Image: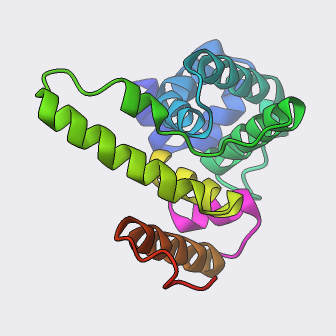
Amino acid sequence: MNETLKLMANETDLAARAADEAAAFAAIYDHYFPRVYNYVRYRVRDLDLTDELTSLIFERALTRISTFQPEKAPFGAWLFAIARHAIQDHFRAERRRRWLSLDFFVEHPSPGVLPEEAADQADTIQRMLNAVSQLDAREQDLIALKFTSRLDNVQIARITGLSESNVGVILYRALHRLRTLLNGKENSYDR
């Protein structure tokens, strides 16, 4: 059985081994890298910054892996908590808050797309960006955790300190508000 399959089967044991075995941490890295990278990418605008923050997150995870306590939360929740804190630290240091960025997709349409489709896609993405920017930071953060990192409400609750039901309610209301904003009925939803 390869390391990635072992990770999925028993990530707690693999995390314990990762403090001493490079191969164990490499399996964790290979398994979680795409999800962490996507989460960071949707939270920041710059590709170089995404690479830098993703590297920092895995560096922190490696140096702190001995502090992982599986009885408190699953490894994935622990890792995404590190990711959230790294991003928050960055924004705090830079004195700016850009929580969810889709600008990259406006500037880089999919290959093989006809110009008309690219224009429609850019328009749709711009409308989505405008709608998302009207959400508060917590709503944007939860949407990023849910849809870019593919975390479930239980995992998001562990990361954010909210209850699972509160996460669900916030996401439901945020998605409802997005739908309303995208349909041009901006004032029909009271928060």
Q: Residue at x 46, y 44 (%)?
A: 9
Is any atom of residue 154 visible in this view?
yes
Q: Residue at x 53, y 78 (%)?
A: 173
Task: Give the colour scheme of this rendering.
Answer: rainbow
Rendered location of residue 157, percent (x, y): 66, 66
* Front residue of 93 and 162: 93
Report the quarter where the C terminus lies.
Answer: bottom right
Please, is residue 105 above or below residue 99 in the view? above
* Front residue of 3 and 132: 132
Rendered location of residue 118, percent (x, y): 21, 33
User: In the image, 116: left or right of 72?
Assistant: left
* Front residue of 103 and 85: 103
Magenta-drawn stretch contains 143: no
User: In the image, 156: left or right of 108?
Assistant: right
Characterize the magenta stretch by its predominant secondary structure.
helix
Please, is residue 49 above or below residue 64 in the view? above
* Front residue of 93 and 14: 93
Residue 134, located in which quarter of the rendered image? bottom right
Report the quarter where the N terminus lies.
Answer: top left
Q: Give the range drawn in magenta.
A: 152-163
Rendered location of residue 106, percent (x, y): 38, 32
User: In the image, 61: left or right of 34?
Assistant: right
Please, is residue 9 above or below residue 154 in the view? above
Residue 75, located in which quarter of the rendered image? top right
Magenta-drawn stretch contains 154: yes
Number of numbered discs on residues: 0
Is any atom of residue 1 visible in this view?
no
Rendered location of residue 37, percent (x, y): 54, 30
Please, is residue 115 above or below residue 167 in the view? above
Q: Residue at x 42, y 53 (%)?
A: 128
User: In the image, 158: left or right of 106?
Assistant: right
